[in-house]
Every structure is written in structure tokens, then in C-alpha cells.
Amino acid sequence: MKKIGNRGECSDQAPVRYWDYLDDYRRNREEILALVDEVFASGRLILGSRVAAFEEHFAAFCGSRFGVGVNSGTDAIFLALKALDIGPGAEVITVANTAVPTVAAIRATGAMPVFVDVEADTFLMDVTRVEETVTSRTRCVLPVHLYGQPVDMEPLLDVARRRGVEVVEDCAQAAGAVYRGGRVGSFGAVGAFSFYPTKVLGGFGDGGMAVTKREDLHHRLRRLRFYGMDGGYYSEEEGYNSRLDELQAALLDFRLPALDEEITRRKNIAAIYTGGLEGVGDIALPLVQSDRNHQYYLYTIRTGRRDELKNYLEGCGIETRINYPTPIHHMRGYRFLGYRQGSLPVTERLAEEILSLPMYPDLLAEEAGRVVEAIRSFFRNQPLSGKKDHG
Ligand SMILES: Cc1ncc(COP(=O)(O)O)c(C=O)c1O
């Protein structure tokens, strides 16, 4: 039997990284180091003019009014919910097909996450399931713009308005993505962003931001990130320490103007994948709805032979990831939520089939082409076992 993942089947070229920032760093090294020096020499390291400038620029970029820099995307969600007075006794409707922090942030407030299933072709919240999930305890819907494609916001906002619940957008993976002419983060009461290094706008450490158009929420968010204080060593309410520092803010502000161009580069890579993988084996490509602009934080395919393919690509020196291998309701840490096997069938099935291909702005067209070629050769050499239906 032919060994799958045997490097000999592939060419002996350099490995294809799943994600890397080092080319970007090398290109911009002098400017980055000059900025570091400037911040260190400024005498102000926390909540100074650079944080204020980046908050203003990023909120404007999102088409929102105010930005509040915090120390992570998780905290941006947590503080957004706290600013809306969501806590014990409340339910927040979201998805289990997301990164753990979406749910961890809800639980940190004491509220309970309630999951709706996702669409099989976009991987996003099935917004047609939201209304039937609303109860008298529902206070908020938390859609996740997963992999960089916006959720169908209009019907979701409509349900939320009719049922009197808030909307907080988890935009951690989707900075810059557009839905019907508006950027993500500009639709809900608050948009929560992560600047974790791998994100489309990534810093050189942790960081996040909550954006809002509402003055009252802006004020609450600023207070909550700073021990509940408006200033002067006096807490108006119980608060937290969640600040974006001057250094990360300066570096992120430096990177922001290039974001749209970097998204274009991501789209060019996605076009190589889509062009080369259409109709190959049993692969289902990510569906992009025509009213939205996917910015390809991740390019995630589906195949019934996911694990074999992943091993094969690894043998070819091509890194891939599974985002995410276990739906949250199946994780030990969240079994107490009481969801049984089969309760979110699409989410559960996706976890078995999804595979994210290498994606970052500096990935070369030639490298993306090698990924396509390796996948095509996998399906040429390992004919289908009859599993074709992706439901
Ligand atoms: C969908 C989603 N939500 C929230 C987060 C949390 O962001 P952070 O890692 O900055 O806390 C992440 C990133 O890890 C994410 O991918």
C-alpha cells in the first residue's frame, strides 16, 4: 500500500508555513524599531496619546464612532457584555463553532451561552434559528464573523430589534470585512476586535478593541477597563484592568493603513485556492455570499478525508490547521452546559471535515500554487472512497 504523507511524493521544496509574520517584520523593521524607541522615549507607556489616536483611527476605519483599546479580544467581548449590564441570569445566543474565548467571555460575566447551529456552506451562525432560541432570559445575540466572513446581519438585527435584545459582534477574525456596504463592528451595540498577532490586524503581543456608536457604552467601556474609575483613584463601579498599552497601539496604528491592501493580498491567495480546487475530489470550498466581503483570515475547506489529507500535506511540508477540532459544547470545560451529542449537527459535522490552508498576506502565489498541486495530487493518487455528500 502506498504510504500517505510520504515526502517522496512531493517535491523537495521549502516548507509552506500556515502563518508567518517575519517577512513583514523584516520589510518594516526599521520603522517598527523607530516606533518602539519613540514610545519608550516618550515617557508615557499606558493610556496616552497613541492609544487615543489608534482608538480614533480604528473606530473610523470600522465606520463606528468610538473605540476603547483593551488588552485582548476576549476582554473586548467581556467588557461589551458588562457595559450592557449582562451577567448572572442572562442568556447570550451564540455559536459553538467558534474559538473558545467567545464563550469564555460570556461565562466570565456569569451569563449562560445558548448555542444555535451554523450554516454548512459559510460556517456562520444560522440566523434563521435565532428567533426560536430567544427566551425571556435572552439579553444579547453574539454573532461571530468566523474566518473573516460577516454573518447575515440584517435579519439578525431585525430579530434583535423585535425581541428587544442587544447585539454584540465578535469581530476577532474579521477586521475590515464588509457586509452590505458596512464594516463589521458597525452593526451591533458593540463590535469586539482582537489584535492577537495572527489576526488580520495583528500586534506584537496581545491587544483588543471594543467599538461602539453609543456614547453611554463608550463611557461605560472606558470606565470598566480602568478599575471602574473615571479618574482620580475613585471607582464609580466595580471594574477591571484591561488596557491596550502605548507600544501596541503605536504599532497597530502604523499597520492599519496597510490593512485593506493586505486583505486584497489575502483575496488573491484565496482566488488561487478557489480556482485550483474547484471540483477536486470531494472538496467543498468556502461559500462567499455576494452581499459580503470575505477578508480570508482563514481559507477553510471541507472534505470527508480531512485527516488523511492533512497528513499528506504535512508530508509535503505544507502546514494546515483545524479551526476548530472540537465544538465547544463537547469540550470537558463546557459539558456542564448540558448539550448532548447531536444537538448541533452541522457544527459537529464540520469539526470532522474542516481544514484551514496556509493564509497570510506574504504567502507567495507560487506557495499557494504548491498547496493546490499537493491537494490535487492527493485526490489523484488516493481515489474517492465514495464519500461525497457534504449535506
Ligand atoms: C472568534 C474569536 N473570538 C475571540 C477571540 C479572542 O481574542 P484574543 O485572543 O485577543 O483574546 C478570538 C481569538 O483568539 C477569536 O478567534
Image (spheres, rainbow, N blue to C red):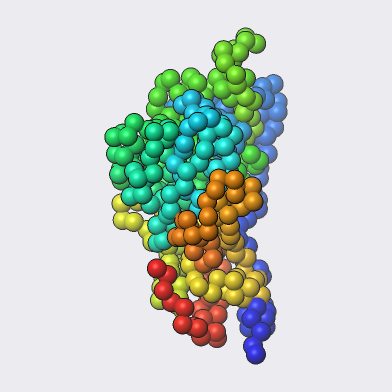
At horizontal 53% and vertical 22% (from top left) the residue drawn is: 222
Say if 283 sits above or below 88 in the image: below
Say if 265 sits above or below 39 in the image: below
Which part of the image, by quadrant, shows the C terminus? bottom left
Which part of the image, by quadrant, shows the N terminus? bottom right
Q: Nearer the viewer, residue 69 or 304?
A: 304
x and y, in percent, of residue 66 in the image:
45, 27
At horizontal 58% and vertical 60% (from top left) the residue drawn is: 325
Q: Nearer the viewer, residue 243 or 166?
A: 166
At horizontal 66% and vertical 68% (from top left) the residue drawn is: 15
Please tell me in which quadrant of the rendered image residue 62 appears: top left
Asked if one can make out residue 116 in the rendered structure from this viewpoint, the answer is yes
Say if 385 sits above or below 249 in the image: below
Please tell me in which quadrant of the rendered image residue 320 appears: bottom right
x and y, in percent, of residue 289 in the image:
34, 56
x and y, in percent, of residue 26 in the image:
65, 51
Q: Nearer the viewer, residue 136 or 330?
A: 136
Q: Residue furthest bottom?
A: 1
x and y, in percent, of residue 318 in the image:
62, 69
Give the left or right position of residue 35, taking residue 210 as reference: right
- Numbered marks: total: 0
At horizontal 47% and vertical 56% (from top left) the residue drawn is: 343
Asked if one can make out residue 186 in the rendered structure from this viewpoint, the answer is no
